[in-house]
Image (cartoon, rainbow, N blue to C red):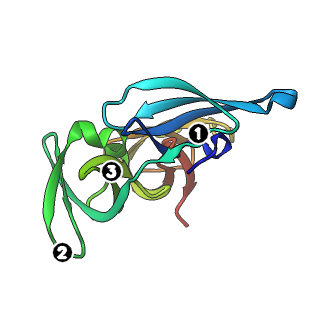
Amino acid sequence: MYSPTDLKKGVLIQIDGKPFRVIEYNQKVMGRGGSIVNVRLKNVIDGNVVPKTFKGAEKIEPASVEHRNVQYLYADGDDFHFMDPDTFEQFQLPGELIDEAKNFMKEGIELDLQFFDGKVINVELPKNIYLKVTYAETVVKGDTASSLQKDATLETGYTLKVPAFIKTDDEIKVDTRTGEYLERKK
């Protein structure tokens, strides 16, 4: 069981038999009255976001989520195909379940699927991933201030801001949680 102060961003809990992910956390200390924790929770099945307040002594049930390591194979229209590396079983998931993760999924990547009651509820990518730049704008000579940023398109089709020195065919490290450039591969 979790106490309200354990509810940090990203923690999965279960309320009335439904899994929720904490997306916002705020704690208020009330002097002798203990503390209150205000959270915003996202239902991982239907995507609804609800606010909830917990008092200091409440106990919260963690969501019984199973994890399964899979390999991403390819996309076919709006469907994404995966394989279990242990059993070689192949299966597909609809694009709306993949959501923002598709921006960073290249063929062959290993990722984690989260299951609740036998259904996939979330695709968990590695925190950082290296992706190849397929197109980067050219910088005009003299426009090379250190803070200059330009658009670059990755091999997955995702576009992000990168420093001016990044060129086409460079491999860059991207934070999959924020979609931001981290560094160029050495």
Return the disc, 3 or 2, that comes first in the chain's sequence.
2
Q: CA distance from mark 1 to mark 2?
A: 54 Å
Q: Residue at x 53, y 23 (%)?
A: 51
Which residue position holds label 1?
141
Mark 1, Cα crowd under 10 Å, few <14 / some 14-19 / many 20+, is: few
Say whether residue 111 is left or right of residue 34. Answer: left
Q: Amino acid at mark 2?
A: Thr
Instruction: From the viewer's side, name the closer residue of 34 and 104.
Output: 34
Q: CA distance from mark 3 to mark 2?
A: 29 Å
Which residue position holds label 3?
155
Return the disc, 1 or 3, that comes first in the chain's sequence.
1
Q: Does residue 47 sit above or below 141 in this rendering?
A: above
Q: Amino acid at mark 3?
A: Glu
Q: Look at the numbered discs 1 and 3 and tell me whether their residues touch, using CB distance below 8 Å.
A: no
Q: Quadrant of the C terminus?
A: bottom right
Instruction: From the viewer's side, name the closer residue of 19 and 147.
Output: 19
Which residue position holds label 2?
87
Q: Amino acid at mark 1?
A: Lys
- Residue 105: x and y in percent read 32, 52
Q: Look at the numbered discs 1 and 2 and tell me whether their residues touch, using CB distance below 8 Å.
A: no
Q: Residue at x 35, y 43 (%)?
A: 103
Q: Residue at x 32, y 50 (%)?
A: 155
Which-is-in-front pick, marks 3 and 2?
2
Mark 2 lies on a secondary structure that is: loop
Instruction: From the viewer's side, name the closer residue of 91 and 137.
Output: 91
Mark 3 lies on a secondary structure that is: loop
